[in-house]
Image (tube, rainbow, N blue to C red):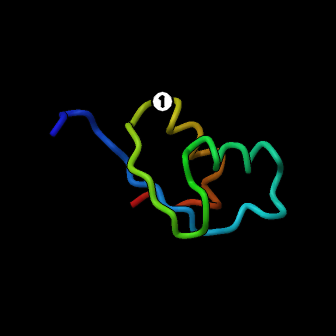
């Protein structure tokens, strides 16, 4: 296993009715439907995307 740090992100709220750029950010993180989960590398870019849509996701 690699020594890179990762974050597990889960979409807990639907992006329907949110701004288009927030929906695009959700898709950019690879989250498709509510309760979908992705394990992402912990980089400043990913952290910024998570902060932008913090009200839609849960970091496990």
Q: Position of residue 22 (x, y in %)?
A: 73, 48
The answer to whether 10 is drawn above or below residue 4 in the figure is below
Q: Position of residue 14 (x, y in %)?
A: 69, 67
Secondary structure of the residue carrying tag 1 is helix
Across the whole image, how many numbered discs are drawn on residues? 1
The answer to whether 31 is drawn above or below residue 24 in the figure is below
The furthest residue to the top: 44
Image-quadrant location for residue 57: bottom right
Image-quadrant location for residue 42: top left
- Could you tell me which quadrant the N terminus lies in? top left
Q: Residue at x 61, y 64 (%)?
A: 33
Q: Position of residue 4 (x, y in %)?
A: 25, 33
- Could you tell me which quadrant the C terminus lies in? bottom left
18 to the left or right of 29: right
Q: Residue at x 59, y 45 (%)?
A: 51
Q: Position of residue 35 (x, y in %)?
A: 52, 69
Q: Residue at x 82, y 47 (%)?
A: 20
Badge 1 local density, few (<14 within 10 Å), some, or many (20+)? few
The furthest residue to the left: 1
10 to the left or right of 39: right
Q: Residue at x 64, y 60 (%)?
A: 55
Please give the residue where the numbered disc 1 appears in the rendered image: 44
44 to the left or right of 57: left
Front-lying residue, 48 or 15: 15
């Amino acid at each position: 296993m690699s020594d890179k740090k990762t974050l597990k992100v889960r979409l807990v709220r639907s992006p329907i009715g949110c701004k288009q750029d927030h929906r695009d950010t959700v898709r950019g993180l690879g989250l498709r439907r509510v309760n979908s989960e992705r394990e992402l590398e912990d980089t400043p870019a990913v952290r910024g995307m998570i902060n932008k849509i913090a009200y839609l996701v849960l970091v496990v």
